[in-house]
Amino acid sequence: MIAIATSLAMSLAVLGFSPPGEAQAQAPAPAPNWTPLFNGRDLTGWYTFLQKHGKNQDPDHVITIEDGAIHLYKDAPEASNVVMGYIATEKEYGNYHFRFQYRWGTKKFEPRYKLKRDAGLYYHILGKDQVWPRALQYQVEQTNVGDLIALYGMQLDTTIDPKTRSEKMPTFQPGEQGGAPYLLGGEGIAYLRHLAGDYERDGWNTSEIIARGDTTTHILNGQVVSKGTGIRLVDPEKKGPPQPVTRGRIALEIEAAEIYFRNVEIRLLDEVPGASR
């Protein structure tokens, strides 16, 4: 654990980052080199995609903006049947450090009423909009926040706890701490559980993704919880060589649980002094 913390501190020091404390209801002014992607007032720069309704159609009022935050399912009755989808950036992004804060509401809905509260952050989205898209995902599910998911042809290399290799969802473990090489994804949906430990807090949590080139790092409340390298797209239909993936759209997931998102920010590593080292 000490080694992980030390490694994280060194990495974030290079980026000039220190984990934020609890923010106020209104988003504070961003730190140098950070750019807000959500302005706290409307969805300028974003579009919505919902089941049954498609792009930029929300007749059920799934999405509400209040007090500088995105509030999902505010008016939906508990246990009612709801649509799912995401809120995505209009632009593609690559080589960046992305962060956002979330906290859970109290309500859950069908078709996931009896399951854990769930949401997430899609990134490197490629191709058409669909539920769910071809992308990588930072999982935001109670007790599983920070899991790394590869969807529909996305593939990468990582390291896992050797004791979990036979499990459907192996657990990330750094190579320097005995983690064994593991190939994640390539078809369907593949899951990598976050580093063993409970890093989620009550109230607001800070989640981060460092997408540098074809690598990714997931961070929850200042703790590195997953990593991957050599991100690529394997397309069985074309039967060609894997294609490196270094950029794509980013999306906040909407998945049948009341949740709030705020302080959605990005900084491009090409613009951060020293970040390319």
Image: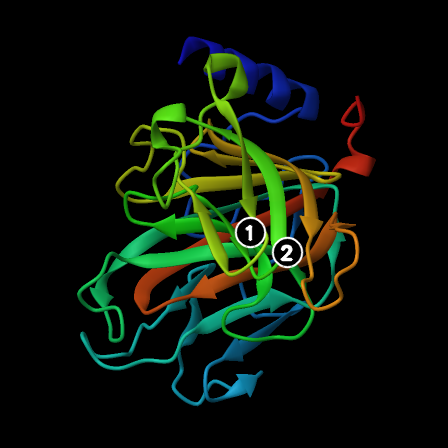
Which numbered marker is on residue 37?
2
Q: Which image quadrant for residue 235? A: bottom right
Q: Which residue is mark 1?
A: 264
> Which residue lies at the image location 27% right of the left edge and 59% below the top edge?
105
Please determine whether, in this image, residue 161 is positioned above or below residue 143. Answer: above
Residue 260: image location, x then y, percent: 38, 58
Residue 239: image location, x then y, percent: 75, 61
Please name the amino acid that badge 2 sits on: Leu
In the image, is 243 to the left or to the right of 173? right
Judging depth in this view, the residue of 74 and 169 nearest the camera is: 169
Please determine whether, in this image, residue 188 is positioned above or below residue 98. Answer: below
Residue that lies at the very extreme toward the front in this rendered image: 239
Judging depth in this view, the residue of 262 and 122 nearest the camera is: 122
Mark 1 residue crowding within 10 angstroms, few (<14) / some (14–19) / many (20+): many
Residue 226: image location, x then y, percent: 49, 33
Dot 1: element: strand
Residue 247: image location, x then y, percent: 73, 52
Q: Give the position of the C terminus as an image quadrant.
A: top right
**From where the camera sits, is residue 39 visible?**
no
- Contact flag, marks 2 and 1 (Cβ < 8 Å): yes
Dot 2: element: loop
